[in-house]
Image (cartoon, grey):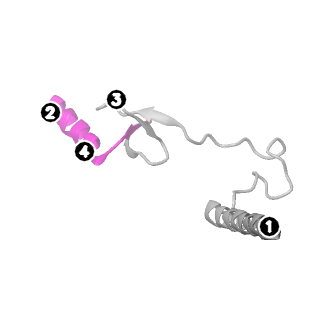
């Protein structure tokens, strides 16, 4: 019976160690989160309006939605067009030149 209890305590101990290591690895790879606008100690309501993030736009060539943060951009006057790839951007430019020529 004593061997059984010792085995159970060993399992609990190892599980605790693995849990602590898992949390440490999670914190390491998760990284630090950015602070609220206006610096530490200020809430988001007190700071400047939060900028729009994770906005998407539709690629005018293929119709795919693409993040405006990582898209290939083409500025035409006051309009900004967002493309999912260089191929779609080049295709758009080639089609535009064919129409104007």
Residue depicted at 22% across the width and 39% down the height = 91
| Sequence-wise first label, 1 or 4 | 1
Q: Give the range drawn in magenta.
A: 79-101
Q: Can you tell which mark lies on residue 9? A: 1
Residue depicted at 76% across the width and 45% down the height = 48
| Sequence-wise first label, 3 or 4 | 3
User: Could you classify mark 1 by the number of other residues whose Cα lies within 10 Å: few (under 14), some (14-19), or many (20 or more)?
Assistant: few
| Sequence-wise first label, 3 or 2 | 3
User: Could you classify mark 3 by the number of other residues whose Cα lies within 10 Å: few (under 14), some (14-19), or many (20 or more)?
Assistant: few
| Sequence-wise first label, 2 or 1 | 1
Secondary structure of the residue carrying tag 3 is loop
| Sequence-wise first label, 2 or 4 | 4
Q: Can you tell which mark lies on residue 63? A: 3
Q: Distance between the residues labelled 3 and 2?
A: 20 Å
Q: Where is residue 30 in the image (x, y as percent from the top left)?
A: 64, 60
Q: Distance between the residues labelled 2 and 4?
A: 16 Å
Most distant residue in the front direction:
1
Q: Position of residue 3 (x, y in %)?
A: 77, 70
Q: Can you tell which mark lies on residue 98? A: 2
Q: Does the magenta stretch include residue 95?
A: yes
Q: Distance between the residues labelled 2 and 1?
A: 77 Å
User: Relative to the observer, which residue lies in front, 26 or 82?
Assistant: 26
Q: How far apart are marks 1 and 4 (CA)?
A: 61 Å
Identify whether 36 is placed above or below 5.
above
- Foreground mark, 1 or 4? 1
Report the magenta stretch's main SS: helix
| Sequence-wise first label, 3 or 1 | 1
User: Relative to the observer, which residue lies in front, 77 or 42?
Assistant: 42
């Amino acid at each position: 019976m004593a061997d059984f209890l010792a085995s159970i305590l060993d399992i609990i101990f190892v599980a605790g160690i693995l849990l602590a290591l898992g949390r440490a690895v999670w914190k390491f790879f998760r990284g630090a989160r950015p602070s609220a606008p206006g610096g530490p100690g200020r809430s988001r309501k007190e700071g400047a309006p939060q900028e729009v993030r994770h906005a998407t736009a539709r690629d005018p060539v293929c119709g795919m939605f693409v993040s405006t943060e990582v898209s290939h951009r083409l500025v035409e006057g006051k309009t900004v067009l967002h493309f999912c790839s260089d191929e779609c951007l080049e295709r758009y430019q080639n089609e535009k030149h064919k129409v104007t020529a």
